[in-house]
Every structure is written in C-alpha cells, then in structure tokens.
Image (cartoon, rainbow, N blue to C red):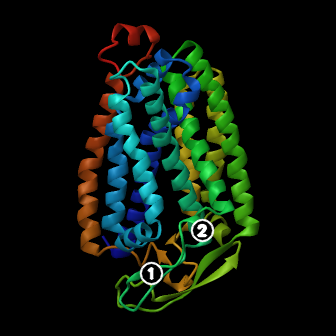
C-alpha cells in the first residue's frame, strides 16, 4: 500500500477512534454531568450511577487507544499538542481522577455529605473533559501559536489563558451540549419513571443548545475566522517534513472542502438532523432509536470539524508554514503499515467484546433494584 494512501487511512482511523471515544465514553460523561441535577435523592442518584457503573472503565479503552494512535501515527502532533496544551491536558487528567474513586467509593459510607461530595466529583469528571476538548478544537481552527526550529524542535509561544477565547469557549459549549445530550438519551433508555422524564427534559434542553451553538460556530467560522490553505509544496525526497511547504491564511478557507467535495455537506446536516431526531425520538420514548440518532450527531459534529480542517491537523498561528498536516506530520510507512495490521486484528475484537458486554448488561435500572442490591450496587 502506498504511503499517501496510508496517510489518508490513518487520518480516517484516528477520526473513527475519536468518534468511538465520544460515543462510548461520552455517554458515561454525559450521565456524570447530569448526576447532581437529574437525581434528587440518594436512591435516584444510585440508579443513575448504576446505568454506567458496570462499564465506564471498559469504555476508557477508546480514550487510551485514541491517545496511543495519535502518538504512534502523528508523533509531531502528539509532541506539539501535549506541550502547547500541557495545562489543558493536565486539567482533563485531574478531572478524570474523580471518576474511578467516585464510582468505587461514593456508596461505601452512608453519609450524605460524603456521597454528595463524590456526586459533584463525578460531575467534574464528566463535564470538564468535553468542555476542554471542545475548547482545543476551537483553538485549532484559529491556529495554535507554535513553530519549529531547523531540528524540528517545537516551541509553544502562547499561554493557557489565551486558549480560553470566545470562539474556543463556544466550541466548548458545542462539545459539552453534544456529550450531555448523548448521556441524557442513554439515561432515558436505561431508566424509567421520574428519572427517565427528567432525562428526556435534559435531552431536549441540551439538544436545543447544541443546535443553536453548532449553527453559531459555523457562521462565526465562515465570516469571522481566517482559514489556512497550502499554496505550495517543496519536494522533500518523500520524507515527512512540516517545513517543506508554504501556507497562507485566507477568509473562508475552512469552507473550501465543502465546495471541492460536496458530499461532505452531509456531515453538518447529520449533526443538525441527528440532534433534532434525538430530541423528538426521546420525547416519544423511543429511547434506543434516540440513542442511535444521538450517536449519529456525534459522527456529524466531529466529522464536520475534521472535514473543515483537512488536510490540516494542527495549524500554526505563529508560523503558518509550520502547520502540521495529514501529509507531513506522520510516522514512517513501515510504522503506519504495522499499526494498520494490528488495528484490523484487534478493533473487531474490541467491538465484539463491547457489544457482548452491553447485551449482557441491557435492561432498566430501577429504584427497587438498588434497594434489593444495596451492598453490591454502586
């Protein structure tokens, strides 16, 4: 398989891993975000926790695999992003620390203050990562302040607080609303009665917020933010060299791919249509179909970001020609090929096991179940 094809395949595979992480771990985080608000007493909150408690840690596989794939397939992106977004990444990790201890220790002590503290810890672990991931994508569209020296050593020239700009925060709202919608629909599917009704109300609220913020971000991107375009490429002997090109900033450049490949317009349409479908289906209590529709929303929104950026992965605002792209930030042909073979072997196994686990754990979690299994349930 030729090198150029492998580069495209790995761009698609990393996208699949990001979508898989958003779908599988996203509904866990969405449920955690809703926990203090949908659950009004201890039993209701235990019902909510036990909808995701048995499998949340298994879903972390998608997060770990996605990070590992970026490290192996796009080492320059990994190194540059983790240095530039260092404090943001630490904030994600610190937030995620609340999840394992929150799930495992929350119900060990029958003290309202103890349990309430861990409920808010699970909220932080569910709400902070999607917000920061969205903010990170918002900064990618504006360009990240970094450059390379002649030895391809990257230097980040920005600050953590500069990441929290208005457009990036709007993208953070898009991400948060998307994940919370997904969690609300899943919660509606796994519960009944008053908890289910509150989850449906939350799905309506956050689905509407997603549609509004996604549309606002699209308009802002079209008229208020200059995109990036490759104007020329210098022959580098077949090696991946991020400095062997000239990049210019142009108004409307982030929309160019939609005119070059009109089928990509299906992605934003899927984002809007999936969110609207999830709201309507959840309100009709067709919760499984609503969950599928919500998952398609994630495909559409994340796919829209990827299609708009392509072929850029991490544009540079300090030195646009140092921007990292699909073509020049990748590992060697051999590395990509070995990883592809491993992916073709292990990805079906992960999907098969996950499907089996969810089939075994299917069904409603009720207050009666929590009372009957008071010592074994989360």
Q: Is residue 169 left or right of residue 243?
A: right
Q: In the figure, is residue 214 to the left or right of 313?
A: right
Q: CA distance from mark 2 to mark 1?
A: 16 Å
Within 10 Å of the Cα at label 2, are there few (<14), some (14-19), or many (20+) other Cα atoms?
A: few
Query: Where's the N terminus, which quadrant?
Result: bottom left
Q: Quadrant of residue 210?
A: top right
Q: Quadrant of the C terminus?
A: top left
For residue 162, the mark is: 2
Q: Position of residue 232 (x, y in %)?
A: 55, 89
Asked whether residue 63 appears in the rendered view, the answer is yes
Q: Which residue is mark 1?
A: 155
What residue appears at the point 37 percent right and 55 percent down from the top-left corner?
Answer: 66
Q: Residue at x 61, y 19 (%)?
A: 197
Residue depicted at x 29% and y 48%: 347
Position of residue 279 measured from the top left corner of the image (x, y, whole percent): 65, 31
> Viewer-proximal residue, 24 or 332?
24
Q: Which one is in front, 47 or 292?
A: 47
């Amino acid at each position: 398989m030729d090198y150029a094809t492998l580069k495209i395949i790995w761009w698609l595979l990393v996208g699949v891993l990001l979508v898989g992480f958003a779908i599988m771990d996203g509904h866990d985080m969405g449920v955690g975000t809703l926990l203090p608000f949908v659950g009004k007493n201890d039993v209701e909150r235990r019902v909510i926790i036990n909808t995701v408690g048995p499998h949340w840690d298994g879903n972390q596989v998608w997060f770990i695999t996605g990070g590992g794939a970026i490290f192996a397939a796009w080492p320059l992106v990994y190194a540059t992003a983790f240095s530039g977004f260092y404090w943001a990444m630490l904030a994600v990790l610190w937030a995620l620390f609340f999840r394992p201890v929150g799930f495992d220790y929350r119900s060990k002590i029958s003290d309202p203050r103890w349990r309430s503290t861990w409920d808010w810890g699970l909220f932080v672990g569910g709400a902070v990562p999607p917000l920061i991931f969205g903010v990170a994508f918002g900064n990618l569209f504006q360009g990240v302040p970094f450059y390379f020296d002649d030895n391809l050593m990257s230097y980040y020239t920005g600050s953590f607080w500069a990441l929290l700009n208005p457009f990036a925060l709007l993208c953070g709202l898009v991400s948060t609303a998307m994940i919370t919608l997904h969690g609300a629909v899943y919660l509606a599917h796994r519960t009944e009665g008053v908890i289910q009704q509150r989850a449906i109300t939350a799905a309506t609220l956050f689905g509407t917020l997603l549609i509004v913020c996604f549309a606002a971000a699209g308009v802002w991107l079209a008229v208020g933010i200059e995109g990036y375009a490759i104007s020329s490429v210098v022959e580098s002997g077949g090696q991946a060299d991020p400095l062997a090109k000239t990049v210019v900033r142009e108004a409307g450049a982030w929309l160019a791919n939609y005119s070059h490949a009109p089928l990509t317009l299906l992605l934003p349409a899927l984002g809007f249509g999936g969110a609207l479908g999830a709201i309507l289906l959840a309100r009709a209590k067709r919760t499984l179909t609503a969950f599928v529709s919500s998952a398609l929303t994630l495909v559409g929104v994340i796919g829209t970001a990827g299609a708009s950026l392509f072929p850029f992965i991490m544009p540079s605002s300090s030195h646009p020609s140092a921007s990292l792209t699909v073509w020049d930030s990748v590992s060697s042909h051999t590395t990509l090929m070995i990883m592809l073979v491993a992916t073709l072997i292990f990805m079906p196994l992960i999907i098969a096991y996950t499907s089996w686990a969810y089939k075994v754990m299917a069904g409603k979690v009720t207050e009666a179940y929590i009372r009957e299994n008071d010592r074994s349930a989360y």
